[in-house]
Amino acid sequence: MEPPDLLVEIGSINDQIREAGRDRLELIERFNQELRELIKDFEETPDTFRVYRDLAKRLERIARRVGKAHDDNLLDYTERFDKALAVLKKRRFETATKELDRIPVLGLLTKQRTLFDEYKKSYTELRARCESLESEIREKTAYYTSLQKIDVTSLDELASLKEKIASYNDNVGTFLEVYFKEAPLTDVLKISLDASYHPELKFPQPPSYENAERLLSFAVSEGLASLPLYRFIDYAKYSDSKLWHYVGDPTGFRQVLELNIVWLESLVDIKRREALKISLDEPDMSLAVKIPRIIAFLSKLSATINLLTSLREIQKLVTSGDYEKIRATTLVNRKHLEKVQQKAHIADLDALQDERASLVEELKGLQNPRAVELTLA
């Protein structure tokens, strides 16, 4: 039901309540509720003498109160209550309920409150929608204005840049994976320790530099320097009797491995890590510092020319001054941009303005819920 219709209904209910009198209606509702609860208890309670006696006493008390209210001229429809009480004494529950249902004013107070709550909710929703439209109009106006400064070609440049970064990240991950799989253990540990001192390279960090250094010393002292990293970790699965054939100090091996195992496993899984990778989320100032350090690091590892070339192409774009302009288009919807260029966005804004104007007019014709509440009978 629409708010204007709800106001009409509330007015009609108010008239009926005023005519009947709120106090008299509240008394009718109270007796009605007590009798219906008694009928329910009669129907649901096991039929024993003690229970029957207790329910009969409640019935008599209600009957006396109904009689007194009638004598004091406070209660309407007493004939219906008397008939309901009379048949209830004979345990004719369905008939008693029907007598109560014949009271025409039952539910007026509940209906009044329900209608008012519905009106209040509708009014609040209308006002909230009106306010949200104001905010939406401001935001879309600002958004469309910003799009007028962007060239469609920036989106193509953005797509190309995303592709280049994704390709580089995948290739550098593959390079590190192969390198760490083939390089001697001590080389992997030294390189990883060195890289971990430079957070911008995003290498896995050892839980403790002291423990990592102990691991490196242990590998050298035990003659494990040339062992591949994955094989060194596999030794942990060997029994002590088998481990004696490969490690002179199995106990020391297990201790130093336990202290570094999480770090070592992250190095084995280096391709899935963020090591030496870059992102469009990073501003040009950050990448301008980070990329040369990545290039220097990859050069030490004798990375392929193709890998270094792809990174230098991204570096060139970052330092050209166009990177931030292209990066800004990550928040741009191509369809929206084309709509602005075709001036089609104006119709969108006009539609929002029309909807808001319509709601404002509708609100002007409605009463504030607080004012409506004060009129309730």
Image (cartoon, rainbow, N blue to C red):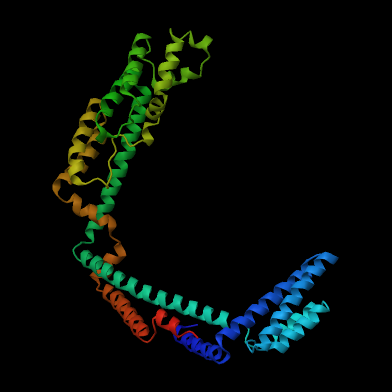
Q: Is residue 369 left or right of residue 160?
A: right
The location of residue 377, given as percent across then percent down, is 50, 86
Q: Residue furthest left?
A: 320
The location of residue 112, given as percent across then percent down, is 53, 82
Q: Is residue 87 left or right of residue 365?
A: right
Residue, x 47% and y 17% (percent of image)? Answer: 235
Q: Quadrant of residue 373?
A: bottom left
Residue, x 42% and y 79% (percent of image)? Answer: 369
Q: Quadrant of residue 289?
A: top left
Above-or-below relation of 241 to 279: above
Q: Quadrant of residue 195?
A: top left
| Foreground pick, 75 / 230 | 75
* Number of disc labels: 0
| Foreground pick, 60 / 266 | 60
Residue, x 29% and y 62% (percent of image)? Answer: 334
| Foreground pick, 206 / 72 | 72
Residue, x 36% and y 31% (percent of image)? Answer: 270
| Foreground pick, 376 / 172 | 376
Above-or-below relation of 164 to 220: below
Above-or-below relation of 21 to 47: below
Above-or-below relation of 169 to 33: above
Q: Is residue 287 left or right of residue 352?
A: left
Query: Is any part of residue 160 visible from this angle?
Result: yes
Q: Is residue 242 left or right of residue 196?
A: right
The location of residue 209, given as percent across then percent down, is 31, 23
The location of residue 168, given as percent across then percent down, is 29, 40
Query: Is any part of residue 184 visible from this angle?
Result: no
